[in-house]
Structure formats: C-alpha cells, structure tokens
Image (cartoon, rainbow, N blue to C red):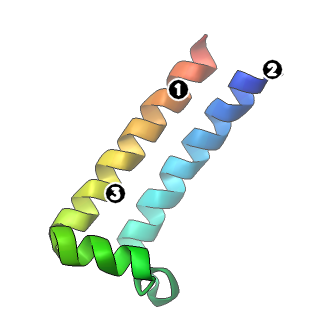
Amino acid sequence: MNGLALLGIILVVYSFAVVGITVKKPPAIWNMAKIKFFIKLFGEKGTVIFFYVFAAIALAIGIWLLTI
C-alpha cells in the first residue's frame, strides 16, 4: 500500500466522522470554541451545511486518491 492510498482511506474515514459528528452533535465537541465561532459566523444551519460540504470534499479527494 502506498502513501496516497493510505491518505485516501484516512480522508474517507474522516468524512464519515465529520458527518457523524454533525448529525449527533455531541456537546463535548459542539461546545468547542471553533465550533461556536462557526455558529456565530454562519448560524446553526450554515455551520451544518459547511461541515457537510467539507465532508463531501474530503470524501471526493479520498476516493480520487484511492483510484490513482
């Protein structure tokens, strides 16, 4: 296994983790200063959309790295 394939797998797992955190909204993570800043900047719904877009980009790059 080469390094790019490993990075692809990590990005795919990371994207699922981001979606899981966004869906469940655990208080320990959702009350972090960075997340509160995003909520203040984008609003609650905008923050969730931002995380979904970020997860989709990570998933796409991860799949791309697995195919090269």
Q: Residue at x 42, y 82 (%)?
A: 33
CA gap, disc 3 and disc 2 = 28 Å
Please state if 42 lies on the left or on the right of 59 as rendered: left
Q: Amino acid at mark 1?
A: Ile
Q: Is residue 43 above or below residue 10?
A: below
Residue 63, label in figure: 1
Query: In which image quadrant can residue 50 be found?
Result: bottom left
The residue beneath circle 2 is 2
Quick check: marks 3 and 1 in contact, CB under 8 Å?
no
Q: Mark 3 is on which residue type?
A: Phe
Q: Earlier in the sequence, mark 3 or mark 1?
A: 3
x and y percent of residue 61 in the render?
Answer: 48, 28
- For the C terminus, which image quadrant? top right
Number of the front mark, 3 or 1: 3
Image disc number at residue 51: 3
Query: Which residue is located at x 46 percent, y 64 percent?
Result: 20
Residue type, mark 2 in image: Asn
The correct choice, above or below, for 44 with respect to 11 in the image is below
Report crowding for label 2: few under 14, some 14 to 19, many 20 or more residues within 10 A (C-alpha): few
